[in-house]
Amino acid sequence: MVGLPYMWSPVYRFPEPRAFHGPRFYNPYADMQGHWRRANLHAHGRAWGGLTNGEQTSEEVVASYKRLGYDVAGISNYHSIAAHQGVDTLAMYEHGYNLTKRHQLAIGAHHVVWFDFPFWQGLSQQQFILDRVARSGALVALPHPDTREAYDATNLAFLTGYHFIEVVNGPFESTAPWDAALSSGHPVWALGNDDTHDITDPRRTAAAWTMIDAASSSAPDLVSALRAGRAYAVERRGERPGQMDASVSSVTVDTGGTVSVSVTGAPAVIEFFGQDGAFRSTHLGGHSAQYTFTQADTYLRTVIRTPQTIIFLNPIFRTTQEPLQPPLAAIDALRTWRLRVGVLAALLVAFVMLWPVRLPARTTRTRTMAAASSVQELD
């Protein structure tokens, strides 16, 4: 029975990892409108009778974030869409019940996917789950990628069909998985979320969030802005869950590849990182910084550090065309059926070997009578 789900999962052909390239530059902030919405897209209320460790009701969690000044309080209960139950939140849920905590966030969800591989998952099984979750909503994010090495650099070089990596999960950063995906040519964006199960826990609540440049807080506007990359992840520094002490005012790139970043508020340390997460440049204590792409630079992402917050901007990367066409894995029909036939054959062999061997009833009665006759002769 354990092998049956693997017969359902197809085998995929994955595009070879290839760094971003081309004479043009894609800037997700090119059409920035300046209408920033503060959002947390990963929090848990009480669900499934308390089995998932949510300490408060989903309504209480939403109310708490609203009091803290959030525009969007996303409730992502496991396999349950709180918005469909009357909660004032974006329709979303968290998928996954496997030992490795290889989970997915379905944002803008319209139904729940229940299927998962609880134990082992190869690359094709991971892609199969991503594709199924993607069909249940508008956007897919990979939460807490470093937890139990849920999404390692090797797999992120190949997996496709998702839009975000949770770069900040509560007090924990995960930039290495993000750089692994970006360095392999996958245009994925950053999210910052609390992943709180208890809104009274100061280490989690208001520890991270995502600023979204959306015309309104309606689901269509939020999804549109997130899909385009008009957002950035924020990590709180220190213990106070207060407001940010800096905000992004502009991010531009000219035809020669010079990136200019400007912030308002507290003086900031502005850092640039490139291929494989390699450090490129830093600018101390100001409100603006520039960096020019070199021939070796395939993408550039910016980190802004202030006394109270750390801001992770989405990357600017080289491209040959717009709109973007991310690489996509495809089902390999021949290898899929070979796998299914092989698994079926293995299950049949195991069934035959484990099936108890029973003697025919007539032979058993004959042996019993013979044994009784022998006893009588001895008597």
Image (cartoon, helix red, strand yellow):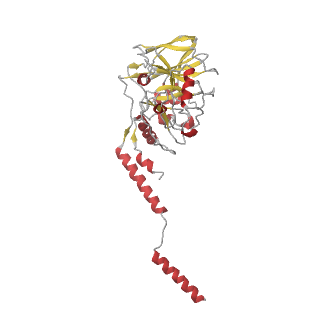
Image: 301 above or below 177: above
Say if residue 284 shows up in the picture: no
Of 34 and 259, the residue lying toward us: 34
Of 21 and 35, the residue lying toward us: 35
Of 341 and 143, the residue lying toward us: 143
Single out the residue that lies furthest toward the front.
86
x 46%, y 41%: residue: 114
Q: How many marks?
A: 0
x 35%, y 44%: residue: 333
Say if residue 368 shows up in the picture: yes
The x, y position of residue 277, in whole percent, is: 52, 25
The x, y position of residue 232, in whole percent, is: 50, 21
Image: 289 above or below 83: above
Quadrant the C terminus occupies: bottom right
Image: 162 above or below 1: above
The x, y position of residue 284, in whole percent, is: 58, 13
Image: 113 above or below 201: below
**Which picture quadrant has residue 327?**
top left
Quick check: 214 left or right of 56? left
The x, y position of residue 312, in whole percent, is: 52, 21
